[in-house]
Amino acid sequence: MESWNKKIYRNGVMNIKKYLKVYSLFLYTSIASELEYKTNVIIDFITAILSLLGSLFLLTIFFQNTDNIGGWNFEQALIIQGIYTILNGITNTWFNPNLKEIVNYIREGTLDFVLLKPIDSQFIISLKKIAPSGFLEIILGIALLFYCIIINQININLVFLFLCFTTLFCSIGILYSLWFLISTTTIWFVKTWNATEVLRSFLYIGRFPLNSFSFSLRIFFSIFIPIAFITTIPSEVFLGIAQLWEILLELIISFIFFIVSRRFWLFALKYYTSASS
């Protein structure tokens, strides 16, 4: 039994090392490729800064004639904006450049080459490309959160950091799973990329507190498209007002969505028609 456990452990470590090595190659080639067009990268950086400034200006307008929206004051709402900026940066860095390529893989028949590689196909499709311009959004979002910690006088401790990272990681998992689920339908319906743009539009709504919407919209954004779990709950954790059941529920939903997206991908591949067949 001991030797069997050691074998499982050794194989697991080797697999992790293999995938880390492959991802490091993806990272190097993507950044090298993007930096060949430095002007585009600079324009994307400027766009990211202007986008954040525009969002902050819009938030300022909303609070111009009121002290709070849905029970959140301006300083607290900035936390939601910071988390939204981080998630949008992650979307622009990984989700958008990779998952939109599923359409091209299927249309051009290059998905065959992906499936033949000795690496998990979902891993390749999800992480092969990286858009460096999204890193600036992530940095800006983190900087905004640090500012929010100061103005809201938030005490930082290990439990606080653990819960913040946990809920933010779950938010990334939910967002990725939703994006991947929609992208997977391309195997049946090639022109489904517009559906991910609809999802992106819903993410824009995540810049505002969930309580600022009507009851029916709160139900919709909690059950059908869980925007509430993507931005509001991590923000509540930041402020120390999140309930334990909310955090546990986000963990469960993140796990369920990821498993469903994984199973759905494997199911969809059974209906994929190879370009060589």
Image: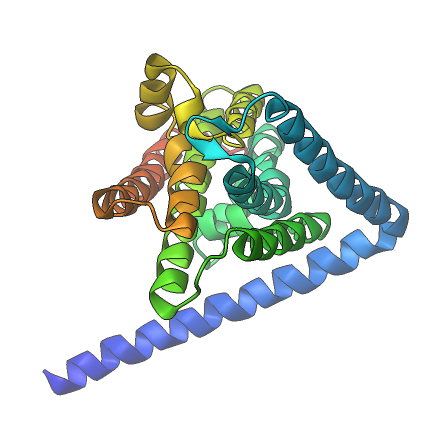
Residue name at image x 35 percent, y 38 percent: 261
Q: Nearer the viewer, residue 135 or 182?
A: 135
Residue name at image x 36 percent, y 51 percent: 240
Please, which residue is most extreme toward the bottom here?
3
Residue name at image x 51 percent, y 24 percent: 202
Q: Nearer the viewer, residue 157 or 94?
A: 157
Q: Is residue 272 above or below residue 253?
A: above
Whether residue 86 sits left or right of residue 136 in the image: it is left
Please provide percent x and percent y for residue 74.
56, 36
Please provide percent x and percent y for residue 94.
59, 47
Residue 254 location, quadrant: top left
Residue 57 location, quadrant: top right
Please provide percent x and percent y for residue 61.
66, 24
Please, which residue is most extreme toward the right here?
39
Whether residue 231 sits left or right of residue 106 in the image: it is left
Q: Nearer the viewer, residue 147 or 176?
A: 147
Q: Is residue 119 above or below residue 5?
A: above
Please provide percent x and percent y for residue 13.
36, 76
Residue 262 location, quadrant: top left
Position of the N terminus, as image quadrant, is: bottom left
Q: Is residue 266 above or below residue 157?
A: above
Q: How is the image coloured?
A: rainbow
User: How many numbered discs, if any?
Assistant: 0
Q: Nearer the viewer, residue 207 or 260?
A: 207
